[in-house]
Image: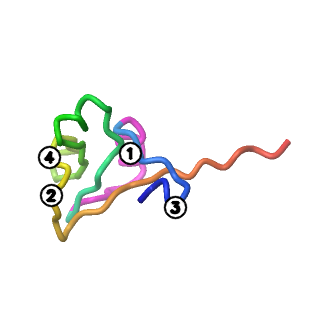
């Protein structure tokens, strides 16, 4: 879906960085960019934030949960 919208899936590194500017995914979670070796196992990374900090773990990629989504990154080149 991210490719359809023309964005990249957000990496774990960027996800952790945005969490420093606010508390996102306190009541939900987000699918994140996942390496090919993890995806080949049928799993994917997801991130969430709890009272004790930011959590990133692996879950079954085909799972459908009503309280989740995905995070993307839109890169806009600088105009010179």
Q: Which residues are magenta?
A: 13-26
- From the viewer's perspective, is 40 left or right of 76? left
Q: Classify residue 71 by image quadrant.
A: bottom left
The residues tagged by marks 1 and 3 sit, at their Cα atoms, a distance apart of 26 Å
The numbered disc on residue 4 is: none
- Front one among 50 and 42: 42
Q: Tags 4 and 2 in contact by the CB under 8 Å rule?
A: yes
Residue under circle 4?
Answer: 59
- Front one among 21 and 72: 72
**Image quadrant where one finds the N terminus:** bottom left
- Nearer the observer: mark 2 or 1; the answer is 2
Q: Earlier in the sequence, mark 1 or mark 4?
A: 1
The numbered disc on residue 5 is: 3
Q: Earlier in the sequence, mark 2 or mark 1?
A: 1
Give residue 23's position: percent from left, percent from top: 32, 56
Q: Tags 1 and 4 in contact by the CB under 8 Å rule?
A: no
Residue under circle 2?
Answer: 63
Residue at image location 16% in from the left, 53% down from the top: 51
- Front one among 15 and 21: 15
Report the residue that reaches farthest toward the right: 80
């Amino acid at each position: 879906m991210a490719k359809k919208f023309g964005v990249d899936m957000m990496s774990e590194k960027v996800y952790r960085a945005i969490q420093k500017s606010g508390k996102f995914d306190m009541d939900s979670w987000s699918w994140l960019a996942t390496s090919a070796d993890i995806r080949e196992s049928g799993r994917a990374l997801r991130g969430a934030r709890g009272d004790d900090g930011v959590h990133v773990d692996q879950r079954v990629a085909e799972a459908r949960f009503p309280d989740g989504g995905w995070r993307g990154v839109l890169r806009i080149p600088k105009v010179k």
